[in-house]
Image: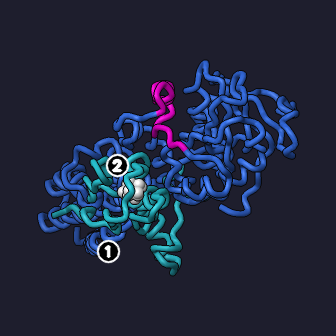
Chain colours: A blue, B cyan
Amino acid sequence: MDGREETGPRCSCLPGPQAQSCCGSTGSAPAEEVRTATSRITLANRLDHLLARWGWNREGHRVEPGLYRLSRPAADSPVFASANYTLSFDALRSALVGVDAWILVLDTKGINVWCAAGKGTFGTDELVRRIRAAGLESVVSHRKIIVPQLGAPGIAAPEVARRSGFAVEYGPVRARDLPEYLKTHTAIPAMRRVEFPIADRIVLAPVELVLALPMFLAAIVLWYLAGPVAALAAASAILTGTVLFPILLPFVPTRDFSTKGLILGAIVALPFAFSFGTSPALPSWAAALSAVTVLLIMPAVVAYLALNFTGSSTFTSRTGVKKEIFRYVPVMAVMVVAGLLAGIALGASRLMGVI
Amino acid sequence: MYDIYTETSLRYDPDRCINCRRCTQVCPHAVFTEGPDRAELARPSACMECGACALNCPVQAITVQSGVGCAWAMIAAALRGKDMDTESSCGGNDGSCCG
Ligand code: SF4
Ligand code: SF4
């Protein structure tokens, strides 16, 4: 994550270059320029969001870090912190329709608030640095900054207060709850909970799929080695692990991702195992071995992809994931190796004309 | 059975708590709830070890070994001969999770 090139100025809210400084006289502090933002989401913004969702130019979806004015903020207007990822920043500004506010954008290298907080780029040091660089104490008359709750894993509020004089107030998890939250500055429990609803899970599917593209090469190779049904089985396993698994996540029994994957993989493998097992072209031992091969490899592949989805989910702990890796990856490895050996035996038999 | 996530590294010392309610505000999984005199550890097994509560508790009543529960990053670290706990990092150029 270090050594990445900063992209040029490209605020998502204004079409042209944003050189204009709009708040130059903010007391004596050598403050950075203050940019302007609106609550409007343009077509270009929507296109940018779509590309981000598909993993296109993953780190290029950035806004310039620094202080922004939304509508016509005054010295007593609220200050919100955000990440310099377009989706995070746009979610915030579009939720604040009709609100005069300041937005302090931290440099999170184009990563969303939640992931950046985990990495520490949305963190205490960066927040304090941005507060100082913007000369925030001379811009506003109060000493409060509203930070998204999902930024809390990176922010030590007591330390921010000590170092900057600004008290951190944690806003709701979702920017869309901000209008309701701002009425009382208290969040009802539902606003504090991270859910992982189907819409959020589906939104992740494109990136998962793009990342899995190289794996489809294996399916193409299998087409030549073992025929179209084997290739279809491989493609099905990959699609099940990357797209179907996230969608069906809460409905598959067990809490461990690996066992969920094994179950789902076994279900998807069944028709293929049946197709191979009842193939009239094969002697019965070879048909049975083909079915076993499928039942060994497909669930293991789906389980591995499922395990890798832990990082995208919103609730797995590191302790748990580590235990999962140690408990289930050996099982998956044994299944795949056994399946491959069976497959090689079948291939050799075919080459030698036995089947 | 088949629920490996019941145990976490979260530890809470209620005797230290000054009932500021910060932990109930930052926890994304309602692990802590408000009590009459101090925070209550209501759903310990729901903890995802994000570290927000420990980082924001003003009196260090909470400790947790925070980290990202991402198998992809941990396996990648292990394959490169690095430490799974401290040297795995999510996202980056080819990370599978950070959108
Ligand atoms: S943050 Fe610490 S002091 Fe505050 S309620 Fe939670 S445990 Fe108690
Ligand atoms: S580490 Fe995170 S998930 Fe666990 S109790 Fe603390 S705030 Fe909640």
Residue at the outermost bottom position? B81
The verdict on label 2 being within 8 Å of ligand 2 is yes
**Does the magenta-highlighted stretch encompass residue A180?**
yes
**Residues under labels 1 and 2: Cα distance?**
25 Å
Q: Residue furthest left?
A: A284
Within 10 Å of the Cα at label 2, are there few (<14), some (14-19), or many (20+) other Cα atoms? Answer: many
Q: What residue sits 31% from the left and 62% below the top?
A: B14
| Residue A321 horizontal/vertical position (percent) | 35, 65
Residue designated by label 2: B29
Closest to the observer, B69 or A137: A137
The image shows residue B96, relative to residue A195, as above or below, that is below
Looking at the image, can residue A229 be seen? no
Image height of B74 relative to B19, above or below? below
Above or below residue A293? Residue A186 is: above
Q: Which mark is residue A326?
A: 1
Q: Which residues are magenta?
A: A169-185
Q: Position of residue B7 (x, y in %)?
A: 27, 66
Q: Which quarter holds ligand 1?
A: bottom left
Taking the magenta stretch, the answer to whether it contains residue B79 is no
Residue A301, picture quadrant: bottom left
Residue A67: where, in percent of width, then height? 73, 39
**A22 and A315: which is toward the camera:** A22
